[in-house]
Amino acid sequence: MSLLLGAGLLFSAVPQKNDKRKVELKIKGPRMVFLPPAGPYEYSSVTVTLTARLEGDPENAEDYYCLSEYWEWGDEERSRYDPDCDPYKPGTELNRHFSATHRFKGPGRYDVIFRLEKGKKTVLTAKHSVMVQGS
């Protein structure tokens, strides 16, 4: 009996899909790219641009204001951008679009992780896989 009650409480805590206040981070970019040949047995590098979008209507916009961007590229390289923002005022527009460019130096599957952070706390995370293949 207590197991069913616990499951019911867990279910009720999950946000509903039509909840307008739910905030999500979505990444778009190529799923597969090809390395151009540099010689008979070598490949050049390939540059990929990924974009991310903050979607939804947050209950407290200040929690999503002036977020730092942190990209983990899946090849042991990372990049970070810390914006310089004015103090938050009610009605201030949120930055909802983010993008970054990275050069992959070899074939493989790269799981790119993008995080938005406020201070040292992760606010949202998204993942996007890129398959880099030789042509």
Image (spheres, rainbow, N blue to C red):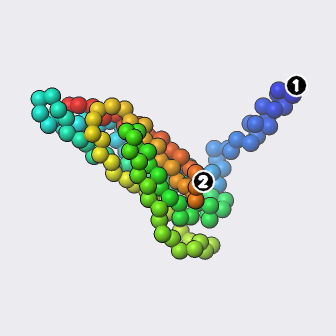
Figure quadrant of the N terminus: top right
Q: Is residue 132 above or below residue 121?
A: above
x%, y% of residue 43?
Answer: 19, 35
Q: Which residue is mark 2?
A: 121
Where 123 sits versus 1, above or below? below
Q: Is residue 98 above or below residue 106?
A: below
Of the residues under marks 2 and 1, which one precedes in the sequence? 1
Local SS, label 2: strand
Determine the residue positioned at 76% across, 40% down.
12
Q: Please rate how many residues cluster around mark 2, counting C-alpha atoms within 10 Å: few if below 14, some from 14 to 19, many from 20.
A: few
Residue extending farthest to the left is 40
CA gap between label 2 and label 1 equals: 38 Å
Instruction: Farthest residue to the right: give it.
Output: 1
Question: Foreground residue, 17 or 125?
Answer: 125
The x, y position of residue 90, in whole percent, is 62, 73
Q: Nearer the viewer, mark 2 or mark 1?
A: 2
Q: Residue 31 has which mark?
A: none
Q: Which residue is mark 1?
A: 1
Residue 99: image location, x then y, percent: 39, 54
Res. 57 visible in picture: no
Q: Is residue 96 left or right of residue 34?
A: right
Tell me if label 2 and label 1 are in contact, CB under 8 Å.
Answer: no
The structure residue drawn at horizontal position 27% and vertical position 35%, both measured from the top left corner, is 106
- Residue 59 is situated, as x and y percent measured from the top left of the image, at 67, 59
Residue drawn at x 34%, y 41% as measured from the top left: 30
> Tag 1: Cα neighbours inside 10 Å, few (<14), some, or many (≥20)?
few
